[in-house]
Amino acid sequence: MEKRNERQVILFPLPLQGCINPMVQLAKILYSRGFSITIIHTRFNAPKSSDHPLFTFLQIPDGLSESQTQSRDVLLQLTLLNNNCENPFRECLAKLIKPSSDSGTEERKISCLIDDSGWVFTQSVAESFNLPRFVLCAYKFSFFLGHLLVPQIRREGFLPVPDSEAEDLVLAFPPLRKKDLARIMGTSAQSKPLDSYLQKILEATKPTSGLIVMSCEELDQDSLAESKSNKVFSIPIFPIGPFHIHDVPASSSSLLEPDQSCIPWLDKHETRSVIYVSLGSIASLSESDFLEIACGLRNTNQSFLWVVRPGSVHGRDWIESLPSGFMESLEGKGKIVKWAPQLDVLAHRATGGFLTHNGWNSTLESICEGVPMICLPFVWDQFVNARFISEVWRVGIHLEGRIERREIERAVLRLMVESEGEEIRDRIKVLRDEVRRSVKQGGSASRSLDELVDRI
Ligand code: UDX
């Protein structure tokens, strides 16, 4: 680890698990390069500061009511947070940059602010303090570029898509089909607030000092090249690879307590015999979909480790809607937990497949461990990631249509038992090695990180 320099970096994550993890991992990378780290965060979904004693944490009020923190409407939450946090954030930054004269401390040397692309007020705040701002893009870069076109596509009257065209590719947003785009763009009732939010993201990203991308040439070559040629962004772009495989000490930034009993349970299983099932930190299921997944998994007769977050089955606290005797009928082949130590589970030799919603963190974590996937995307970027997994890299199977027990069973058996699964596994090992090489010295992501550190 390099000697800590005088320079301080301020980070401001969006308060969602899928955004906190990359930001904390980025903090660890920059700390290992000698920067001091201050993390400004909201009260809602505050990261556990005790897990990261080397960083300074500063909490700001976010104005969310109890019921707003429980809302399933993420767009609404992000809109409220952006409306409520501007003043508290400005005041917090002012105190950091210009400590009051009676506090006796000198003005700090703050190198830059790094915050999530989903914060749309921070660019003007940073400019008012003359502070360079870098934006973290914790999505696949092709999605990030493409989704900013959504308002334009909508304006051009692209939707609704006639049935006959549903399978056609969208030229501006490969490898999406028109039907994928229709699902991403949502209902017309959601379109106005969504388009206005995306427009603000675009405007607040263009004038920044750079984009830090959680991806690499090996995964996003086309869109990185395209962004250079079509100049959507004329700012530097730093694809520094999956953050969690950089050489920094491991630590958890989970908001829920991971159930560590998963690991001794996996220890008892044969190599590559367990299918891991997790739908991330936001997705939720109707009771009937939950039961279809449960029965599909049971019918495979394969071992499974399944994360069911409390409250993620509509109208239920946890898994009480399982038929009585369900767990006993599995004879030890199934384990259900509320939250898992996912990185350790994916790295475990017993894990042979991952039934995932394809959030970008989960997708990268699975690629980096060479674990093939069954894709069950719910919203947004997850459809893009699922298309890359199933059609471009061919390292997983895409479950489309209604959630149905026979489809689940069939996909698990194809991946875990049949020869098709072996071929998929071979391909993901090649991809894993390429991606891991990119963060090693001399690799594309490693060079990008050096450039970013120089730039900061
Ligand atoms: C959200 C969006 O839904 C997703 O589409 C976007 O790409 C990122 O932001 P989320 O749905 O939570 O993320 O999924 P994901 O990106 O996969 O992040 C979940 C994180 O929680 C991963 O880092 C995963 O390792 C961790 N996790 C998940 C656990 O540590 N334990 C679990 O049991 C489940």
Image (tube, rainbow, N blue to C red):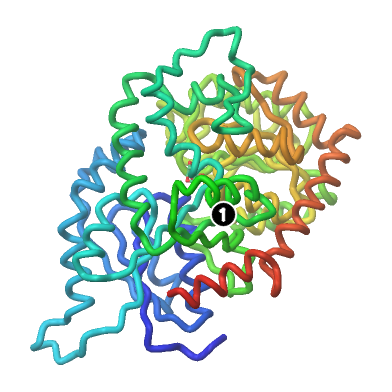
Q: Is residue 125 visible?
A: yes
Horizontally, residue 160 falls left or right of residue 431, namely left
Residue 278: image quadrant is top right
Quadrant position of the C terminus in the picture: bottom left
Q: Is residue 332 visible?
A: no
Q: Position of residue 122 (x, y in %)?
A: 27, 57
Horizontally, residue 337 falls left or right of residue 115, namely right
The answer to whether residue 211 is above or below residue 58 is above
Q: Position of residue 359 (x, y in %)?
A: 55, 43
The answer to whether residue 407 is above or below residue 145 is above
Residue shown at 53% from the left, 41% from the top: 143
Horizontally, residue 102 falls left or right of residue 206, namely left
- Give 362 or 223, whichever is nearer the viewer: 223
The answer to whether residue 103 is above or below residue 290 is below
Residue shown at 78% from the left, 47% from the top: 428
Quadrant position of the N terminus in the picture: bottom right
The answer to whether residue 27 is above or below residue 362 is below
Residue shown at 58% from the left, 74% from the top: 249
Mark 1 nearby-residue class (10 Å; few <14, some 14–19, many ≥20): some
